[in-house]
Image (tube, helix red, strand yellow):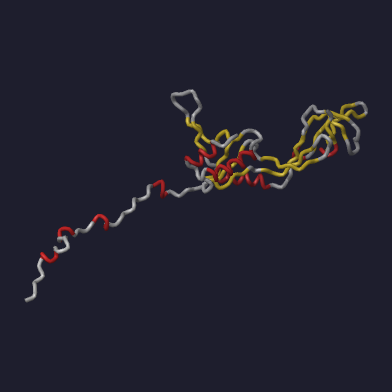
Amino acid sequence: MSESLTDSHLDTDGFSADDISVDTAAEAPVIAEAPSADQLRPQVARWYAVQVASSCEKKVKATLEQRAVTLGVDNRIYEIEIPQTPGVKLKKDGSRQSIEEKVFPGYVLVRMVLDEDTMMAVRSTPNVINFVGQEDRRATAKARGHIKPRPLSRQEVDRIFKRAAEKKAVVKVDLTEGDQILVTAGPFKDFQGEVIEVSGERNKLKALLSIFGRETPVELEFSQISKQS
């Protein structure tokens, strides 16, 4: 007679039905937390003007480019520009030197996604003074308020870079009204005189020359004169 299969046979290995359970929690699907409104908002890069110490524009640009990588924000600081236009510097001996004339001396432009990390990276860069923006007034303190960076408008950006793209050279001459000059070329060569007006846009100046014993205003090219010490 065959032995019937009973519960006692199931217990021969020391386990009972009660010992077998299913971890329903482990099998439950994991529901990801919905992203916040800030995470869903697209990150838009805008141009900002940053005031820097005098003559430190190139130094700030190079340092900030380096720091952006070091601080891990180079994926949000895209461009750092110093708008410049071609220029010519007239030296005292009458010779000319090609230069790059800054459109806005004392400022650099930064295209970036504005957040706490990128603001800190810019503000803590040596020789940076602050962003150009609106000051939040402190109601109970005499100290200056916090500057809230203001993005440049599309019209402002277009105007700045259009001006920088102009190929007409600006002449920068170390001359002011009252300076003494010597005419080195042209019909008034070897005459001395005093500057009464400087027109860098026209590459010309007016000077009073003593002609036949009379002070006569004469218009001269920058290339026709040299400055007297």
Position of residue 67 measured from the top left corner of the image (x, y, whole percent) = 56, 42
Quadrant the C terminus occupies: top right
Position of residue 169 measured from the top left corner of the image (x, y, whole percent) = 74, 44
Q: Is residue 153 visible?
A: no
Residue displayed at 87% across by 27% down: 215
Horizontal side of residue 117 vs 21, given as left or right: right
In the picture shown, does residue 123 fall above or below 138? below
Give the mark count: 0
In the picture shown, does residue 58 fall above or below 41? above
Horizontal side of residue 179 vs 126, given as left or right: right
In the picture shown, does residue 218 fall above or below 28? above
**Residue sitting at the far right:** 212
Q: Quadrant of residue 88?
A: top right
Position of residue 57 measured from the top left corner of the image (x, y, whole percent) = 64, 38
Along the line of sight, the residue nearer the viewer: 108 or 178: 108
**Residue sitting at the far left:** 1
Quadrant the N terminus occupies: bottom left
Position of residue 170 measured from the top left corner of the image (x, y, whole percent) = 73, 41
Horizontal side of residue 142 vs 127, given as left or right: left
Residue displayed at 31% across by 54% down: 31
Along the line of sight, the residue nearer the viewer: 125 or 216: 125
Along the line of sight, the residue nearer the viewer: 77 or 151: 77
Q: Is residue 54 visible?
A: yes
Q: Quadrant of residue 95?
A: top right
Along the line of sight, the residue nearer the viewer: 123 or 136: 123
